[in-house]
Amino acid sequence: MFLEEMKKGNLLTQKHIADFKAGEVLIKVYKDTICMGRVLSADNEKIVLESIIDLNASTMIAEQGFMKILDNESYFSVDTDFSFDECKDALSVIETSALYTANPAKRKEIVSFTASVFPPRFILFLKKKNMLSTIFVPVQQKLRIGKYTGLEKWEDVNKTRFRNMLEELCENEYITYMACLPEGRSKRALFYTSGTETHVETDKKLKKELPSCQTNCGGNIKLYKKDAETNYYIVDAGSNFKGHGVDASIEEASSVSSYLKNLFPDFKFIPAHGRGGVGSKSSF
């Protein structure tokens, strides 16, 4: 019902999926499902979105992901034009909210996230229709404040999954990994594995889950031994896909081991030259 009212108010423009540009706010309608997100990229096969929100349930589905193009779907661009007064009034809606008042340390983040997802005229429309939960529930999920903090960040889920894969290894068994190692230590490194898939296939799977991720390292991790205190792993940076293969240096592996140690401080990581982290079962 509210979609029809948005159309009447010239808040929506129906478009072909390939015509969407990065930065636009998209609403997708398929049967009874209505989802919204900010476009990162779009073509005739898939849409990559961030801050994906289920408008029927007023809840955030995912921080980032892609949607396949299905038959009988409709796509709308949310109007991002606004006047000075509309912008001022929309900001006032956010800054006079109970959530904003109760979280002084998060006020800049509340405004920044809201502005990135909800255009001013859309905010004013939601206020008029008494639908501001469409904004404030996702804000709480995104920033993990207030009552609605149930959305788990993909990075946290992935870290837990990676740790579980390490813990399940038997001696001399290994996993392949792809990683995004940031410059400096202010940001957390990201490690991803799908078992003993090749590094190319592992990277493809990662991009399906986190399309914006650009890996810069790959290699192997083998369980060397377990004792009563901890697990010991041999780590290399020997991917041919994104690395120097058998010529990967121990210095490269040491850097990877250092990032792993920061993520999993209760494990011991031993750097190895080349592909020293490959275990008894090899996928390449």
Image: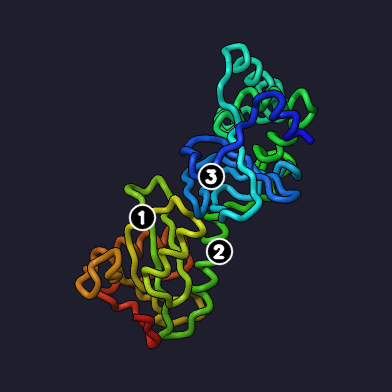
Q: Quadrant of residue 281?
A: bottom left
Residue occupying the far left of the picture: 247
From the viewer's side, name the closer residue of 164 and 32: 32
Q: Amino acid at mark 3?
A: Ile
From the viewer's side, name the closer residue of 111 and 57: 57
Q: Nearer the viewer, mark 3 or mark 1?
A: 3
Q: Could you say where residue 130 lies in the image, as x and y percent from the top left?
A: 80, 28
Residue drawn 35% across the image and 75% down it: 234
Q: Which residue does the numbered mark 1 point to in the structure image? A: 181
- Give the Cα separation between the discs numbered 2 and 3: 35 Å
Scheme by which the image is coloured: rainbow
Q: Quadrant of residue 154?
A: bottom right
* Contact check, label 3 and label 1, Cβ < 8 Å: no
Q: Could you say where residue 216 lies in the image, as x and y percent from the top left?
A: 32, 57
Q: Residues within 10 Å of mark 3 (few under 14, many from 20)?
A: many
Q: Quadrant of the N terminus?
A: top right
Q: Residues within 10 Å of mark 1 (few under 14, many from 20)?
A: some
Left/right of residue 181 with respect to residue 159 in the rendered view: left
From the viewer's side, name the closer residue of 194 and 166: 194
Q: Which mark is residue 17?
A: 3
Is label 1 in a helix, a strand or a loop? loop
Q: Residues within 10 Å of mark 2 (few under 14, many from 20)?
A: few
Q: Amino acid at mark 2?
A: Thr
Q: Which residue does the numbered mark 2 point to in the structure image? A: 160
Residue drawn 50% across the image and 75% down it: 229
Q: Is residue 106 visible?
A: no
* Contact check, label 2 and label 3, Cβ < 8 Å: no
Q: Amino acid at mark 1?
A: Leu
Is label 3 in a helix, a strand or a loop? helix
Is label 2 in a helix, a strand or a loop? helix
Q: Could you say where residue 11 lies in the image, as x and y percent from the top left?
A: 65, 27
